Image (cartoon, rainbow, N blue to C red):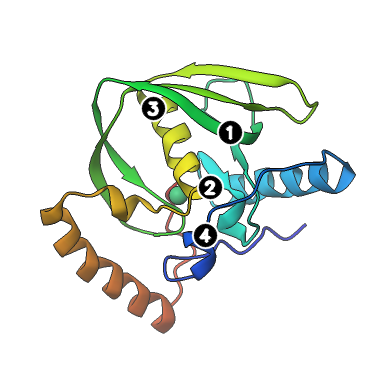
Amino acid sequence: MVPYEIRVIGDPVLKRVAEDVTDIDGALVKLTDDMIETMYAAPGAGLAAPQIGIEKRIFVYDLHDDTGPHVLLNARITESRGEWAFDEGCLSVPGLSWEIVRPNEVHVTGVDLEGNDVSIEASEYAGRVFQHELDHLEGVLLIERLDDDQKRSAKRAVREMLMGRSAAPQPGLSFN
Ligand code: ZN
């Protein structure tokens, strides 16, 4: 399969709130397989369905902890604690990253591909991946998590990135 094209900042689908998945069927399993392939091809640590233009509460992730790729449906953060600063990037804002402070620990609930309820405690890197992908399901890009000073320079950097892409696409740039 050819990996999906990953939507880039400016695409309105990235600003929409995704809808819950109601049916787990063969088409959904195929979609998540293709999302995992797209995530690895990018490469990234996570990929949310809106990033490939699908407005559903689905994301895939691989925390590089030898447990392989995972699929989480209808995920929500039910609790968060602490603070952690991390240099964060996004496949939909290619080539750019910023130090962003977010809660360190999160409790995430959702459903797996077998329809089982899932409850996950995650901190630091894992916690960040979940918060980042959850944001995509709410139509929020990491740019909105920047402080005011960062936002000013980020606007210019994003504009230059988008101009550079239209002049000469650079598929080699990789962020999750
Ligand atoms: Zn992202």
Graded by Cα atoms within 10 Å as few (under 14), some (14 to 19) or many (20 or more), the crowding at tag 4 reads: some
Q: Distance between the residues labelled 2 and 1?
A: 9 Å
Dot 3 corresponds to which residue? 125
Q: Which residue is drawn at 87% across and 41% down?
A: 25
Q: Residue 137 carries which label?
A: 2
Graded by Cα atoms within 10 Å as few (under 14), some (14 to 19) or many (20 or more), the crowding at tag 3 reads: some
Q: Which is more N-terminal, label 3 or label 4?
A: 4
Which one is nearer the viewer's eye here, 168 or 110? 110
Q: Residue 16 carries which label?
A: 4
Give the image location of residue 81, x and y in percent. Answer: 31, 19
Q: Which mark is residue 75?
A: 1
Give the image location of residue 147, x and y in percent. Answer: 17, 49
Classify 125 as above or below 43: above
Q: Which is more N-terminal, label 3 or label 1?
A: 1
Q: Which is more N-terminal, label 2 or label 4?
A: 4
Q: In this view, does 68 lie to the left or right of 91?
A: right
User: Which residue type carries mark 2?
Assistant: Leu
SS type, badge 1: strand
Q: Residue furthest bottom?
A: 167
Q: Is residue 173 left or right of residue 73?
A: left
Q: Which residue is drawn at 76% across and 31% down?
A: 113
Q: Does the residue tagged 1 have its C-beta within 8 Å of any atom of ligand 1?
A: no
Graded by Cα atoms within 10 Å as few (under 14), some (14 to 19) or many (20 or more), the crowding at tag 1 reads: many
User: Which residue type carries mark 4?
Assistant: Arg
